[in-house]
Image (cartoon, rainbow, N blue to C red):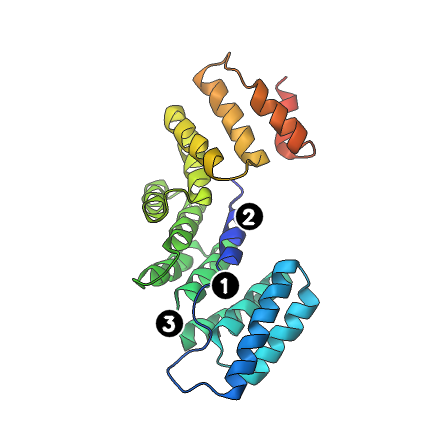
Amino acid sequence: MRIEKIVVLLLLLGLLQGCVTSGSKKPTDNDAASNVNVELGIGYLRQGNLELASEKLLRALQYNPDNVKANYTYAILQDRLGQKELAERHYGIATRLDPKNPEAANNYGAFLCRNNRERESEKYFLRALDDPLYKTPEFAYTNAAICLLKVNERDDAREYLRKALAAKSDFAPALLTMSELLFSEGDYAQTKLYIDRYHLTARASAKSLWLAIRNTLELDSAGDVAELAQRLESEFPDSREYQDWLKIQ
């Protein structure tokens, strides 16, 4: 399972959620300038312009070092640049400034998970989920599940995925992760239900098509996979999954 890619996805999609500054102090001109620069930095980060993203986020922190969103977004940027220590420092600042901020906690948890600190990461996912007003609990539930699967904690992972789908029944990352989990356990009938739901709610990927092909063949060795294979070839001809398909022809 390609856990790292999913975790990164859930982290980046959560960037625009949540509070910008911590505490209840009256906003100042510096706060306003910091907030504007955070949003500009996020925009550049989404575009892949890391140099300008860094410039704007550093400016945001200069205006207000206690800007929670500036700290955890700068941490995301530094993580992408491979600066793990700097990333962790700013995640730590964000979660200390606002321990109840669910987005900061979820993003820090994702960082810890990707760096093989699975047990520690779960604590931060649960911290995010402690907030009853958290708008996207499916992110933290799915991240927790993906992370636990790295250490083969399947039962707890399955429960987190169920909770993610209870929060948002069409949440594609949870549907795909559940499909992979069920397939690995040999429950091919249930895998089909979840992978079909995934393809109804999200654009197919090389991973999802290859999983659907393998699952169809497990259900019926003579199963008709021609349409799935054609899509895999036409949409993802350079993928590892397509090369794996060619090997079994």
Residue sitting at 37 percent across and 55 percent down? 137
Which comes sooner in the sequence, label 2 or label 3? 2
Residue 214 location (% of width, % of height): 51, 24
Query: Can you tell which quarter of the image residue 203 is in?
Result: top right
Q: What is the CA distance from the residue labelled 1 to the residue labelled 3?
A: 18 Å
Residue sitting at 32 percent across and 41 percent down? 155
**Tag 2: residue type?**
Lys
Res 136 label: none
Relative to 67, residue 72 above or below: above
Relative to 34, residue 137 above or below: above
Residue sitting at 51 percent across and 46 percent down? 3
**Tag 3: residue type?**
Pro
**Tag 1: residue type?**
Leu
Q: Nearer the viewer, mark 1 or mark 2?
A: 1
Q: Secondary structure at mark 3?
A: loop
Residue 188 location (% of width, % of height): 40, 25
**Left or right position of 153 against 247:** left
Q: Nearer the viewer, mark 1 or mark 3?
A: 1
Residue to which mark 3 is pinned? 99
Residue 48 vs residue 98, the one in the foreground: 48
Residue 77 location (% of width, % of height): 60, 65
Residue sitting at 49 percent across and 53 percent down? 10
Res 16 label: 1
Query: Can you tell which quarter of the image residue 18 is in?
Result: bottom left
Res 5 label: 2
Residue 243 location (% of width, % of height): 66, 28
Which comes sooner in the sequence, label 1 or label 3? 1
**Left or right position of 77 against 31:** right
Q: What is the CA distance from the residue labelled 1 to the residue labelled 2?
A: 19 Å
Give the position of the C terminus as an image quadrant.
Answer: top right
